Image: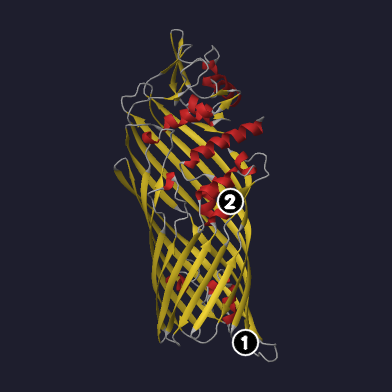
Amino acid sequence: MKRLLYVAALLVVSQAAMAQDNSYESLSRLFSQSNPQGSARMQAMGGNHSAIGADISNITGNPAGLGFYTRSELSITPQFNQITNSSQYLNNTQNSNASQFSVGNLSAVFAGRNRNPVQSGGWQGGAWGLGYSRQNLFKNSIRFGGRNNQSSMADYFAELANNEATGSQQGVVVDDFRRDLENNGNVFDYPTSMFYYGLLIDPTSQKGYPYIGTEQGKAANQSFLSTSTGFTSSWNLSYGANYRNKLYVGLGLSLARMNYTNTKTMNESFENAAAISGFSYTNDLTTSGNGFTLKGGLIYRPNDVIRLGVSVTSPTWYTISESAGQSLQTSLARPFLINAETNPEYTNNLPTALRSAGYGISYQGTSALITSVPNLSILPFESRYRLRTPMRLNGGVGIFFGKSGFISADAEYVGYSGMKLSSNDNNADGGLRDGYYTGVIKRTYRNVVNLKVGGEYRINNVSVRAGASYYQDPYQQIAQFNNLDRSRVVYSGGVGYKTNNFYIDGTVLYSQQNSAYSPYILADATTYASARIKNQTTSAVLTIGTYF
C-alpha cells in the first residue's frame, strides 16, 4: 500500500511539473541538448569539427581527426559562464543572474610512431585520445512575479484534488486526508493531503469534493523563483587512424554522467484575506545518472584544399535515479475555525491529531481554532528509470588556404523524437513503465538540423577565429508552443598563440534564446498566466596546451 501511495504522490508531482519544465519529457530534452564544446579554438569557430583534424576536440567530436596527430598533446580548458534572464509576467519584468566556473575539458592525445605507409600496408600512424569533458551546465536562476487578479496556485491544487480518483467518484474525499494526517502527522503521503491541511483547498460538500481554492476570487500577489544546478559530462576514450594521408577513421567510447538539482518556490499573499494571508510552496527535484555512448567517424582528404567529414554518435543510454519532494508553509490571516459545519471530517479527535502534528490549537467555547500551521511536506519519493537520448549525425566540409587558415561548416542532425523513457521500478511513475511519456515525447518534439560555420586566419604564431552556430527549435508547432521560437544562435570569436612547444587560446561566446514558463496550469486557459523569458548567456573559454 505504501508503494502505491508513493506512486500517487509522484503522479501529482509530475503533473505539477508539466507547467514548470520538470516533466519527464522536458527533462529528457534538457539532458540531451547540445552546445558548442571542446577546445577554445573549436568553440571560437562555432563548435564545428567534423572535417577538422588534429584538435583535442576530436576526442569527443569526430574521432577520425585523431589520425592527423604526429605528436602527443596535453591540454586543459577552464571556462566561465554568465547567464542573465529577463522575465515578463503579468506586465512586470524581473531580472535574475547565475554564473559558474568549471573545467570544460581535460584531455591528452598519445600519438603513434609508425609513419611508413609501405611497411604498414598504407596505414601510417594513429593516436589515442583520453579525456574528460562537460557538455552542459545547468546552473540557472529564473525569477518573476506580479499581481494576479484571475487565479491563485491554490486553484491549481484544488483541481488536482478534484481530478484525483477515489473509487468510482471523481475527487479524493476528506476521510482520505484525515487518515493521512493521523498516520503521518505533518509529513504526508499525498500532496493533496498537504494542500488540504495547509488550508489551501476548501471542501464544498460533506465528502469534500468538489474543492475550491482558499481565498478564491481574491487578488494574489505572486512571486516565483526557480534555481538549478548540475551538468552532463563524460570520460572519453577514442582512437583515430590514418590511411595514406587520405582517409582517416576513428572510433570512440564515452562513459557519461549527469546530475541535476532544481528547486522551485511559489510565494503568494492575498489581498483582503479572510482565512490565510498567504503561503510558500516548494517543489524539489534531484536526479543523477550514468550511461555510455558510442561514436565513429571518417574524414576524407582528396587534396590539400578540401576535407570532408562525417561522424555518428549513438544515443546515450542513461540509468537515472530521482528524488522528489514538496513542502508548504501557510500564514494565517486570523485563527482558523474548525467545527462540524466548516470541516466535514471534524470529530473531537481532530484537534488532538492536529496538535500532535505541530498545529497551534486553541478553543473558543466548544469550537477549536487553528492559531498556527507547521511546516508541511510529503514523504520523499525515490525511483529509477532509463533514458535513451537522441542519435546524432554530423557532416561537414573544410576548405584550406595553405598555411594561412581555413573555413569550415557542419550540419548536425539530432533525432529528438527518438528519445525514449522506460522503467521496471515498481515505485516509478506508471507512465514510465507503460510508454506514456515516450508517446508524449513523439508528440512534443521533432528532429532538427543544427548548422555551424567558422574559420581561422593565421599570422605567424597568432590565429584569429570567428564562428556562429544555429540550434533549431526542437518543439513541434502544437497549440501550447505556438507563437514562440525557441531556436538559439551562438556567436563566437577568439584568438590563439602557438609555438612548437605550447599554445594558448581564448574564446568568448554569446547566445540569446526565448522561452516560456508557467508556474501552474488550469483547465481554463484564460485564468492563468505564463512568463516570457529572454535568456542571454556569455561564456569565456581558455585552453592551455603543450606538446610532448
Q: Which residue is mark 2?
A: 288
Q: Give the alpha-carbon distance from disc 2 to disc 1, as whole Å.
A: 44 Å
Q: Is residue 45 visible?
A: no
Residue 58 falls in image quadrant:
bottom right
The image position of residue 45, as x and y in percent, is 43, 72
Quadrant the C terminus occupies? bottom right
- Determine the residue located farthest toward the top in the rendered image: 365
The residue furthest left is 91
- Confirm whether residue 134 shows in the render: yes
How many labels sit on residues? Answer: 2
Whether 121 is drawn above or below 290: the answer is below
Disc 1 secondary structure class: loop
Give the crowd class for mark 2: few <14, some 14-19, many >=20 residues within 10 Å: some
The residue at 42%/40% (across/down) is 519
Q: Position of residue 380 (x, y in %)?
A: 58, 37
Which residue is identified by label 1? 244
Dot in front, 2 or 1? 1
Instruction: Name the secondary structure under disc 2.
Output: strand
Q: In this orientation, which residue lies closer to the viewer: 344 or 530?
A: 530
What amino acid does circle 2 point to?
A: Ser
Across and down, in percent, residue 291 comes to 63, 57
Q: Left or right: where does residue 192 sit relative to residue 115?
A: left
Q: Amino acid at mark 1?
A: Arg
- At x 57% / y 70%, what residue is drawn? 311
Q: Residue at x 61, y 47 (%)?
A: 321
Residue 386 lies, in percent from the top left, at 63, 50
What sort of colour scheme is used for the picture?
Answer: secondary structure
Q: Residues within 10 Å of mark 1 (few under 14, many from 20)?
A: some
Q: N-terminal of the two: label 2 or label 1?
A: 1
Q: Are marks 2 and 1 in contact (CB under 8 Å)?
A: no
Judge from the rendering whether residue 379 lies leftward or rightward of residue 517; answer left or right: right
Left or right: where 325 falls relative to 264:
right
